[in-house]
Image (cartoon, rainbow, N blue to C red):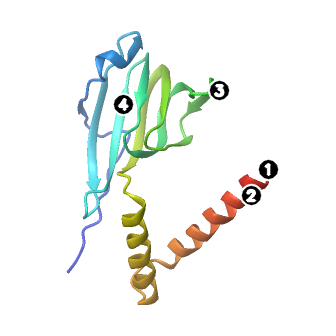
Amino acid sequence: MTIPILTATAAAAELTAAPIVPDWIMAGTPQASCKAVGFSEDRTSYIMIWECTPGRFRWHYSEDETVVLISGELFLTMENGQERRLVAGDVAFFPAGSTCIWRITKTVRKVAVLRKTMPAPIGLLVRIWSKLARIRGRLNPHVERLSTEKVTMRAMQRAE
């Protein structure tokens, strides 16, 4: 069975209106639009192209989200008050359950990878299944390398 590979040109994709929750808007009239471009087989993760015009709003993350900014400029204010500027080429990770304030100064377009979180016991079962698949030679060997690097990074962060 051949599994199709999906591709999209993020900068040129046609998007559909996706209004921001009105209670989240703090200033301006930001207009958002998006397009889902691919889903995992189990529907626990997907890729989306998202765009928003200038404005300021609070965003609550119900899923893990990794973004790559394609164009525009924004300032993120974290829950601890720290502000960070993001421009084209920047990457950010927002864990499920987090909240931050977006202040968009130039219309932003991003590619987002969203992943539904799962209870720890189910995550453990998925990791066991993945390990067995790697042993059988069915998964990309780089997945193991990246997992090891993540553990090393966590250890370094704890040491700081």
Residue that badge 1 annotates: 160
- Mark 4 packing: few (<14 Cα in 10 Å), some, or many (20+)? many
* Nearest the eye: 121 or 82: 121
- Mark 2: which amino acid? Met
Q: Quadrant of the N terminus?
A: bottom left
Q: Answer with left or right where residue 82 lies relative to residue 105.
A: right
- Mark 4: which amino acid? Glu
Q: Nearer the viewer, mark 4 or mark 3?
A: 3
Q: Position of residue 45 (x, y in %)?
A: 33, 55
* Nearest the eye: 104 or 57: 57
Q: Answer with left or right where residue 98 lies relative to residue 113.
A: right
Q: CA distance from mark 1 to mark 2?
A: 7 Å
Say whether disc 4 or disc 2 marks the residue closer to the N-terminus. Answer: 4
Residue that badge 3 annotates: 82
In the image as oriented, which residue stretches furthest toward the right?
A: 160
Res 90 quadrant in image:
top right
In the image as oriented, which residue stretches furthest toward the bottom?
A: 136
Disc 3 on helix, strand or loop?
loop
Residue that badge 4 annotates: 51
